[in-house]
Amino acid sequence: MSSEQTPQKTKFSDKVQFQLLIRYISQHQRLFFVVMFMMLLNVGMGMVGPLIINFIISIVEKGQQLSNTSVAYQAIFVYGIFTIASWLAGVIQMVFVAKLNARFIRDLRTDAFANLIKNKIPFFDDQKSGDLTSRIINDTRELSDSANAMAWVTTSIVRLAFVLGIFIYFSPILSLAAIGFLPIVILISVVLGRYERKVSAVWREKFGEVNTRFHEIMSKIAISKAFNREKENLARFEEINEATYNASVKRGFAIFIFWPITDLMKHVLTILFLAVGVWQVQQGMPIATLVLFLVLINYYYWPLITIANNYHRFQGAFASLTRIAKIAYSPELTERNEGSLQPNHLDGNIEFRNMTFGYSEDLSVLKEINFSIKSGQRVALVGHTGAGKSTIASLLLRFYEVDKDTIVIDNHSIEEYELENYRSLISLVSQKVLLFQGTIRENLSISSDLTDDKIWEVLDMVEAREFIEALPDGLDTMVEENGKNLSAGQKQMLSFARALLADSDIIILDEATSAVDLYTEAKIQDAIDILLESRTSITIAHRLTTILKSDLIVVLDQGRIVQIGDHDQLLTEDGIYAEMYNLYMETQSAKYLTTIKR
C-alpha cells in the first residue's frame, strides 16, 4: 500500500460549479454573444412597444384632433414594425440557442468522459456501471439548457434595469411598490430552489440505481434463467423503481409548484399597481402612466421570474453537475503520472523490493514481496486462489499505487516512466477477454500500419485462421457487445493474436488459457512460445502444465512468497508447489496429456 497520504476530496461549491459552467460556455464565446445580442435586441425592441402605447394614450387623452389622430396611427404603425422586429430577433435567437446548447453538452459530455477514463482503477472498483452511465449520459442532458439559462439571466438583469429606470422616471411612488415586491420573489425562489436541488439529487441517485439494477440483470440473464430467479429479479427491480417513482413525484412537485406560486404573485403585483395607481391618478398622475405600468408588469415581472426560475433551475443543474464533477473533475481520482522517462524499449529486468500492498489500509494482500526477474526470463506465479498473484500483475501495470522504488524496471522505479508510454511496452493477456464493438480487424490492429498479411500471419500462429475464414465477413466481421457472437476459446485466440501484434517487451499472462480446452491450449502452445520468446514474461496459471517451461516459479501463499525455484527443484521440496502439482496431475488423464504433447 502506498505510504502517501490520501488526497483530500475536492469540494464542489456553487461557486466552483458556476465557474465550471462558465468555462464551457466561454469555449463558444462568439455563439454565446450572438445569442446575447439577439436577446438584447429582442428585449430592446420589445420595450419600445409599451412606450409607444403610452405615447398613443397620451395623444388620445389630449383630444380627438385630426392631427393627433394621424400621429397616433403613425405610432401604431411604428409599434407594429418594432413588434415584428422583436419577434424576428426572438426566432433567430432560438436558432442560435439550439446550437449553443448542443455544443455545450457535446463538449461537457466528451470532456467528462475523457476525464473519467483517466481515473484510477480503484475508483472503478467501487463504482456501478449503470450509475456511471446515468451520470455521463443523463446528468449531462439535464444541463442542456444551462448556457441558454445563463444568457437569459444576463438579459433579464439588463431588462429589469431598463424597466426600473422607466418606472422611476414616470412614477417614483409606483416604483417603490415594484421594488418592495422584489424580496418576496427572491425569498420564494431561494426556498423552492433549495428544495428542488435536494429532491433532484435524490431522484438522480435513484435513477442511477435503476440503470445499475437493469444492467446487472440483463448482463446475467442466463444465470437468472438457469436458477429461475425471474421473480426475484422483478421484485428487486420493482423495489428500486418504486423508490425512483417516489423521488420523481417529489421532484415533479418541486418543479410544478414554482409556476402556480409565481403566477399568483403576478396577480398580487397587478392588484398592488392598480391600488397604488388609482390613488396616484387621483393625485394627478396621467392615466397613460398607470396603463404604462400595467403594460410593463410582464416586462418587469417576467425578468424577475426568469432570474428566479433560472436560479431554481440552476439548483437542479448543480445537482446534476455535482454528480458529474465528483467522478470526472476530482483530481484525487486521476491516475498519478509524474514520470518523464519515455523509452522505446524495455530490457525487462524487473525487481520487487520488499513490496507490501493492500486494497485497504487495514488489509494487506501482499507482504514483503522480494524477487527479481532477468531480461528474457519466463517467470510463473503460482498459489491458491487469493494468494495475491493477479495483484502483482496489477501493480506491475500500475493499476494501483505502491511505495516508490518497490517495483523497479531496468534500474528505474516504475513511477519514473511516463504512464502511457510505459503501458505501451507491456501486454496483458487475461482470462477475461475484452473485445470492443467493431470489426475483428479493428480489435486486432493495435497500430494503423498493420497489413492484412501480417495479421493473417499472426492468426496462423494462434490457430485462428480457420474460424475467422468461416465467418461471413472474415476480418471485417463485426464483434458484438462483449464478443457474444464468438466463443470463449475464439476470443482467447484473438487476445493472443492482439498481444503478438502489439510486440511488447514485457508480457503478462493472467490465467490466459483458462477459457480454452486442453486440446486448444496444446494447439496454441506454440503461439505462446513465440509470444514469450526473447521477452520477459510473467505467467499466472492454475493449470500447472502451462508453466512447465518457466525459468523461475514463484509460489505465493496468503500474500507471501513461500517458495522460489524451477519446476524440478520445487518438486523435490516438500512444499505447496509439489502438493499442488501432484493434486493437479491426479485429476488429469496422464495418457491424454501425453497424446497431446506428441
Image (tube, rainbow, N blue to C red):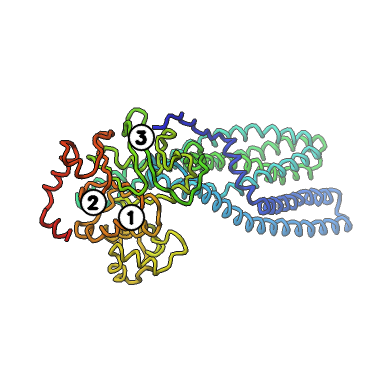
Q: Residues within 10 Å of mark 3 (few under 14, many from 20)?
A: some
Residue placed under numbered mark 3 in the picture: 359
- Which residue is labeled 1 in the image? 533
Q: Report if residue 478 is visible in the image.
A: yes
Relative vertical location of residue 273 with respect to residue 74 in this rendering, above or below? above
Q: Is residue 37 left or right of residue 566?
A: right
Q: Nearer the viewer, mark 1 or mark 3?
A: 1
Q: Nearer the viewer, residue 331 or 305?
A: 331
Dot 2 alpha-carbon crowd within 10 angstroms: few under 14, some 14 to 19, many 20 or more: some
Instruction: Please state which of residues 127 and 553 is positioned toward the viewer in this rendering.
Output: 553
> Can residue 203 be spotted in the picture?
no
Mark 1: secondary structure? loop
Residue 122, given in percent of the width and then of the height, sits at: 40, 39
Spot occupied by residue 428 in the image (x, y as percentages of width and height):
36, 50
Give yes or no for contact between labels 1 and 2 (Cβ–Cβ under 8 Å): no
**Residue 222 location, quadrant:** bottom left
The residue positioned 33% from the left and 52% from the top of the image is: 429
Q: Position of residue 292 (x, y in %)?
A: 75, 45
Looking at the picture, does residue 528 appear above or below residue 311?
below
Q: Where does the image place residue 368, in percent across and percent down from the top left?
A: 33, 31
Q: Secondary structure at mark 2?
A: helix
> Label 2 is placed on what type of residue?
Thr
Which of pointers 2 and 3 indicates the residue nearer the eye? 2
Q: Is residue 250 above or below residue 52?
A: above
Which of the labelled discs sits on residue 546, or is there none? 2
Q: Which badge, 2 or 3, is on the more N-terminal residue?
A: 3
Q: Rounded to the nearest whole Å, what is the CA distance between mark 1 and mark 2?
A: 15 Å
CA separation in Å, label 2 and label 3: 29 Å
**Mark 3: which amino acid?**
Tyr
Q: Please, what secondary structure does the residue beneath circle 3 have? A: loop
Q: Would residue 550 be found to the left or right of residue 91 on screen?
A: left
